[in-house]
Image (cartoon, rainbow, N blue to C red):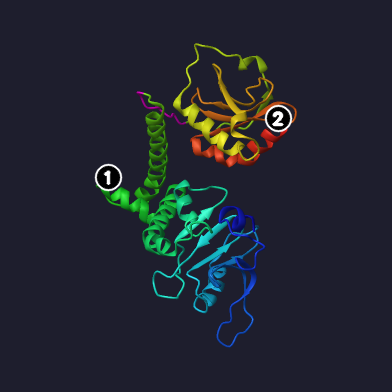
């Protein structure tokens, strides 16, 4: 309901706009219900099926809407678990819901490029023709992005073979495939990191790239906070990598406080993220000056726990801990 009213802009308790438990008879089955139907001019335009947020959306969730799609005038179907929203239409065959979504929106990891597409079915700018005309490209671009992201997280045999054949001229025996599994994965991650650094360099007008060393992860440990380290030092050089890490931490922390409250200070040995530019409110530190990079977070006793990271994006793994640290310093 918050998504329907706040994001899509429909009046959630106006039965002329949003109908809960919408009846969609299917053949001899009467009284079949859809959790929500968004109406325009007395006709259902969007069908929504709601599932528990404790589990990821499944294929069968979409298949339930599949039955109802041909019995209404709706051209958009959206199964959701409240966190992930999948939007389907009927590109492949008229009045028959596609097997794959044209858009997948994860509210915990929003892809900014999808925001204009989510606005198209909203109350104030509902444009069905625009949605349908752009749907095919959107559907496949989204599918390709999800597939590429999956390969960067864990390369498939086909992905490894594709690149190995282009750089290695020897026999592709089992030993070679095993060797290049790790190499292709490492090259993929380094490529992403370098791409992020290039974008930061362009955005900040810097003249040189950043070398990102790698090292074996160290054991997690804790140590007291040294408040005096937060003093400003004009000889300190802030790196693009530190600023990139700061932006990720800030984006996560904004879920608990206003963005303008989040500031940073650089010290010789680390980069601190604070609330209200207050020395007494540092809730995270980035240690990026050594061979091994760390994210350090403060606990209730004002001691720090360090988390080794190899790439900036790994900071997102500690999003819950970052939010908790922000709350403690409010």
Magenta region: which residues?
207-214
Q: Position of residue 206 (x, y in %)?
A: 38, 24
At label 1, counting other C-alpha atoms closer than 10 Å, the crowd grade (few under 14, some 14-19, many 20 or more) is few
Q: Residue at x 47, y 46 (%)?
A: 112
Q: Check disc 2 and report the residue beneath it.
A: 329
Q: Residue 167 lies in what quarter of the image? A: top left
> Looking at this view, is 120 or 163 the one in front?
120
At label 2, counting other C-alpha atoms closer than 10 Å, the crowd grade (few under 14, some 14-19, many 20 or more) is some
Q: Check disc 1 and report the residue beneath it.
A: 167
For residue 168, say whether it is visible: no
Please name which of the two marks, 2 or 1, marks the residue nearer to the observer.
Answer: 2
Q: Judging from the image, what secondary structure is the residue with disc 1 in?
A: helix
Q: Is residue 228 left or right of residue 208?
A: right
Q: In this view, which residue lies farthest toward the left?
A: 169
Up the image or down, 188 lies above or below 101; here it is: above
Q: Position of residue 324 (x, y in %)?
A: 68, 37
The quadrant of the image that shows the C terminus is top right
The quadrant of the image that shows the N terminus is bottom right
Q: Position of residue 198 (x, y in %)?
A: 37, 33
């Amino acid at each position: 309901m918050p998504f329907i009213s706040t994001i899509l802009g429909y009046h959630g308790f106006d039965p002329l706009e949003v109908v809960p438990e919408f009846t969609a008879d299917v053949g001899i089955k009467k009284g079949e219900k859809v959790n929500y139907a968004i109406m325009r001019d007395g006709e259902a335009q969007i069908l929504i099926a709601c599932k528990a947020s404790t589990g990821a959306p499944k294929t069968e969730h979409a298949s339930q809407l599949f039955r109802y799609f041909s019995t209404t005038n709706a051209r958009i179907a959206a199964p959701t678990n409240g966190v992930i929203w999948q939007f389907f239409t009927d590109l492949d065959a008229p009045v028959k819901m596609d097997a794959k979504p044209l858009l997948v929106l994860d509210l915990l990891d929003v892809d900014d490029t999808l925001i204009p597409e989510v606005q198209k079915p909203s109350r104030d700018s509902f444009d069905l023709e625009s949605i349908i005309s752009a749907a095919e490209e959107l559907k496949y671009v989204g599918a390709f992005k999800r597939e590429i992201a999956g390969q960067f997280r864990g390369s498939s045999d086909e992905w490894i073979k594709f690149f190995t054949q282009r750089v290695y001229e020897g026999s592709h025996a089992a030993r070679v495939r095993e060797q290049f599994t790790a190499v292709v994965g490492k090259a993929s991650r380094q490529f992403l990191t370098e791409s992020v650094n290039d974008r930061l360099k362009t955005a900040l007008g810097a003249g040189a790239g950043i070398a990102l060393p790698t090292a074996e992860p160290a054991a997690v440990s804790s140590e007291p906070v040294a408040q005096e380290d937060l003093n400003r030092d004009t000889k300190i050089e802030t790196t693009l990598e530190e600023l990139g890490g700061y932006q990720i931490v800030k984006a996560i922390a904004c879920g608990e406080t206003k963005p303008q409250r989040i500031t940073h200070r650089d010290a010789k040995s680390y980069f601190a993220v604070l609330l209200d530019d207050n020395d007494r409110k540092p809730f995270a530190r980035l240690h990026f000056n050594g061979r091994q990079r760390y994210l350090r977070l403060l606990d209730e006793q004002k001691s720090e726990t360090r988390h080794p990271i190899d790439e900036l994006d790994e900071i997102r793994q500690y999003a819950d801990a970052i939010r908790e640290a922000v709350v403690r310093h409010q």
